[in-house]
Image (tube, rainbow, N blue to C red):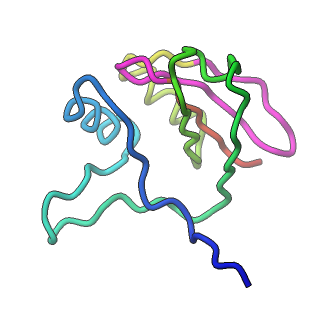
């Protein structure tokens, strides 16, 4: 039997202002800041499906051709999350529903990184 990984333990990426961008994700999407001591717990993602999908090197799905990855966050209520992002001034593009897969929205963080939101149907 082959040993398998259990899931993602973290997502690490470069940022121009790591502290400000981490705070934006915490304030806007609820992704807790990385613990700096043993008394603070890291963000815990809710259980559910995770898609692991390499894309072609020339894909335009991520937007900026220099962006090497795109995060997809599962959400409970797409309409509420879209309203929250818009209220925070984020660029948001709601995508057409894809029954039975779900609802999708593309958004950009303050440093221009495109990410995707997914609400299961």
The residue nearer to you, when weighing 85 against 114, is 114
Residue 77 vertical position relative to residue 98 in the rendered view, above or below? below
Q: Position of residue 57 (x, y in %)?
A: 68, 25
Residue at (31, 28) in percent of width and height: 15
The residue nearer to you, when weighing 28 against 50, is 50
Residue at (15, 57) in percent of width and height: 36
Q: Residue furthest right?
A: 100
Region in magenta: 93-113
Q: Position of residue 76 (x, y in %)?
A: 58, 49
The residue nearer to you, when weighing 59 against 57, is 57
Q: Position of residue 77 (x, y in %)?
A: 59, 43
Residue 43 vertical position relative to residue 25 in the rendered view, above or below? below
Residue at (70, 21) in percent of width and height: 59
Asked whether residue 105 is drawn in magenta, I would say yes
Q: In which quarter of the view is residue 40 placed?
A: bottom left
Residue at (26, 23) in percent of width and height: 16
Q: Where is residue 89 in the image (x, y as percent from the top left)?
A: 38, 16
Q: In this view, does 54 lie to the left or right of 64?
A: right
Q: Is residue 15 left or right of residue 102?
A: left
């Amino acid at each position: 039997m082959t040993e398998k990984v259990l899931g993602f333990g973290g997502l690490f990426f470069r940022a121009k202002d790591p502290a400000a961008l981490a705070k934006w994700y915490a304030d806007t999407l609820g992704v807790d800041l990385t613990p700096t001591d043993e008394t603070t717990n890291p963000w815990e993602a809710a259980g559910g499906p995770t898609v692991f999908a390499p894309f072609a090197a020339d894909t335009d799905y991520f937007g900026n051709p220099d962006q090497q990855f795109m995060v997809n966050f599962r959400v409970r209520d797409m309409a509420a999350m879209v309203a929250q992002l818009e209220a925070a001034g984020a660029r948001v593009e709601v995508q057409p529903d894809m029954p039975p897969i779900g609802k999708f929205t593309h958004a950009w963080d303050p440093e221009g990184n495109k990410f995707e939101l997914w609400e299961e149907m």
